[in-house]
Amino acid sequence: MSKFALNTALPRYLRAEQERVEAVAREYGLDFFPVIFEILTYDQMNEIAAYGGFPSRYPHWRYGMEYEQLSKSYEYGLSKIYEMVINNNPSYAYLLEGNSLTDQKLVMAHVYAHVDFFKNNFCFRSTDLDQKGNIIDPVRKTSPYDPDRRWIDKMANHGSRVARHIERHGINKVEDFIDRCLSLENLIDPWQPFSGRGTTKKGDEEEDEKPIEVPRLRAKEYMESFINPEEYIEAKKKQLARDKPERKVPERPERDVLGFLLDHAPLERWERDVLEVIRDEALYFVPQRQTKIMNEGWAAYWHSKILTEKILDASEIIDYADNNAGVMATAPGRLNPYKVGVELFRYIEERWNKGRFGREWEECNDLDAKRSWDMRLGLGRQKIFQVRALYNDVTFIDEFLTPDFVLEQKLYTFGFSGRNDRFEIESRQFRDVKEKLLFSLTNFGDPYIRVIDANHQNRGELLLEHQHGGVDLRADYARETLVSLVRCWKRPVSVATRLDNKPVLLRYDGKEHSMTPYKL
Amino acid sequence: MRGTCLAAAQFVGQKEPPLDRICYTSEVSLKIDQDHGRFRQIVRGRIRQNLRKYISQGELVGRKGKDLVSIPIPHIDIPRFRYGDKQRGGVGQGDGNPGDPIHGGDEKQPGQGQAGSDAGDHILEVDVTLDELAAILGEELELPDIQDKGKNKISNAHDRYSGIRRVGPESLRHFKRTYREALKRMIASGTFQHDKPVVVPVPDDKRYRSWKTVTEPVANAVIIYMMDVSGSMGDEQKEIVRIESFWIDAWLTKQYKGLESRFIIHDAVAREVDRDTFFHTRESGGTMISSAYKLCSQIIDADYPPDEWNIYPFHFSDGDNWSMDDTLACVDVLKNKVLPRANMFAYGQVESPYGSGQFIKDLREHFGRDERVVTSEIRDKDGIVGSIKDFLGKGK
């Protein structure tokens, strides 16, 4: 079969470049899975990009939409995908056919840094398929570390599972259910693989089985019937049974709504299977969403280092710089993760090289001394390797964003001005910038939703809670999402939230929506 | 699609990535086409809902390139629990002071400051081919396919020389190929002498031209548009005519392989013009509708023998004719010259502040029972859809 297929293997001259780049990357201390490069035409590239990098996914129209968008914007010269790399062991990376040699080298260096990140950042441990149970210590690894991350196969498997259901139940039915599931896709617990929870504890259920023991007063055998009369014991038993706290489902608020539905919703078998596919894939993409700034910053840091120091010759520098500038470009109202990430890594490197950290540095108030502070520690490189292993975007920003950096990088916050009916710059204050940035990164900028009660008002209704952090839910979307939840739960579903500063309960009973004041 | 998915599944369980991984990518093209097609169908569904409003906006006359019309379609956004946009804002990077707008303030959905590379709510431009557009129009208005007058059998058979054979009549012998074969044979067998280059073909060397018979349907429909450009037809009325004729064009083009259009404008006299003039002429004067019908009849006489052509005369006017006499002349021309030869005759009356609108009543009086005459009143842009349905709904 493959004989007739398109040949996507690298041509020899690129293979030679790959070996060169790989050797340099290794020399710098990057530690990566084996990387397999393939070369694709732009439409193949757009196809694979539409599938999120995977050549085989379950069929769904949104990939078609994605494809249309990508190919349109490519054809009109608006954008172009240079590179794509999959977190898989071995990693697959795609090069775009027809790019200049300089571009291909840039992409290769970029890819090796990404793969180093996939392999070493702790968040990505959750994508190890051979990891049984929960990961208690994500930093500790086997040596040599060679995990099973054959996600390409797994995704293809998902594809054939869904295809089987489509064959049996029809595309419209299955696709409609997929749409419903996708509308719940963000209701997962990103830390579930590390949290030590998630598996139902057997112990609790066994406890239920035990007969209720009534504590008896101590008595000699012949006094027993007087001191602990039979009637009293019976009455007490009944009372205890009555008073026994109803076992609540879930026992504590559950963030993994999808997992909860999988365990408890009355789904048909194919529905459960589809939902499981959606949840698995959503969890797979979690680490990449958690580390977007770091991952891109890390890759940008290394492609520029590797290319300018070791790979490029003088004739290629201009092309490289032109291209690199395009990647780093900033646009109003948009934060370029490449730019912020790479600048922050460089900033950290400089600080640790010059010893600008620790108590002495923090307590120094002399601006002049601070400006010329250089203890020649040379710890920068070591520090950034440590950072790339132990942080994610939230902790990265939280710990290393400084007022100086915000000023230097001209960061600002913006918001919607109702008065002028437009988005405006609001502030350049460090506090504001950091707060807003962290807010947009925390939980990927999505609201926190938890399952509170699966037997709301003792009617088998599902009750969710939105932990209101100052920003309202978008009400029309919330209502639509409730419809999806009812589709799975098959009973009325409510979500408790706040709208315009009033606590309300949004409810959908399968026929109509309602909104009532509510206090948890 | 099913086949591809199953084929992909066969890799599962292999320790090494299969050597013929390449076939992943070769099969993708099939897969994405499926998904893409599905998306297009959904988008088409969306167009359907908005069609009414959409036609009336008159945005679509922009004929792009050969046959593409560009239509903005919103990105389909799957609803999720998420924050309301306007309370949200985000973090950006660059110059500017607090209070400065972030690019063109009127843009409703700027990129969100979310640190991801989410596409945001971009408006996606989807190109729909004219053919598709006509299909949508047909579905939406429940237009029947046109029942041909039985003339679509008219087709020309061409003989096209497209290949080479080893047998054939001598008159079709391919001289050059024959000698080339002979030369090849002689060189291969070693009988060719360089100092004495004589090439002698034997019967096996002979090559003949071969042909295929291709039948092509003849362009067999013509629309003759007639428009009143007298003083009472304002810009708005012309705009309505323009939009309506665009859609009629689109529909009939889909129905007939080759479609010709002719354009006649008239006030007190009629003359034939090109498409551009037809839509942009600003004239004034009186109105003699019969002049247009006579010219229409002459055009049919000259170029479109009715047994070979499906003929569609469309006339748009504000219904204000010069005199009753002229109206009678019109009826006469229609009855005796145009109708016997046309598939149907369509009259669209655009409402104008000046016109009396009498003509449509006269037509209805004279042709009330005649199915070949279709009349329709177009009050304003919203009336266009109904009018198209009137005209094309009979499947003639």
Image (tube, coloured by chain):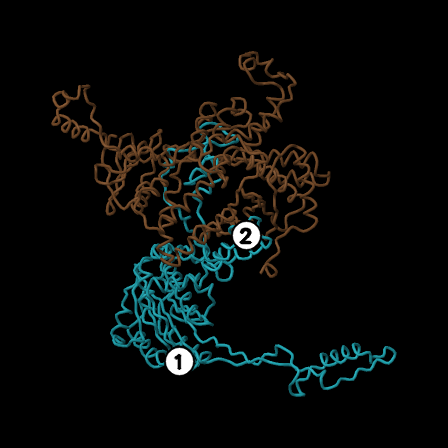
- Asked which secondary structure carries label 1, the reply is loop
Give the amino acid type for the residue marked by disc 2 in the picture.
Glu
Provide residue A249's location: percent of width, then percent of height.
Answer: 29, 36
Question: Disc 2 vs disc 1: which is toward the camera?
Answer: 2
Give the amino acid type for the residue marked by disc 1 in the picture.
Gly
Residue identifier under label 2:
A75
Left or right: residue A103 versus residue A68 is: right
**A396, above or below B287, in the image:** above
Work out whether residue B317 or residue A202 is closer to the camera in this orientation and state it: A202
Q: CA distance from mark 2 to mark 1?
A: 44 Å
Tell which chain the image draws in cyan: B
Q: Colour of chain A?
A: brown
**B211, above or below B323, in the image:** below
Left or right: residue B66 versus residue A499 is: right
**A321, above or below A366, in the image:** below
Work out whether residue B148 or residue B191 is closer to the camera in this orientation and state it: B191
* The disc label shown at residue A2, or none: none
Q: Residue furthest bottom?
A: B170
Left or right: residue B231 versus residue B361 is: right
Callout 2 touching callout 1 (CB < 8 Å) = no
Q: Quadrant of the N terminus of chain A?
A: bottom right
Disc 1 is attached to a residue of which chain? B
Q: Are the numbered discs 2 and 1 placed on the same chain, yes or no?
A: no
- Asked which secondary structure carries label 2, the reply is helix
Residue A164 is drawn in which quadrant?
bottom left
Disc 2 is attached to a residue of which chain? A
Provide residue A351's location: percent of width, then percent of height.
Answer: 59, 22
**A437, above or below B313, in the image:** above
Residue identifier under label 1:
B150
Q: Is residue A333 visible?
A: no
Provide residue A130's location: percent of width, then percent of height.
Answer: 50, 40
Work out whether residue A238 or residue A287 is closer to the camera in this orientation and state it: A238
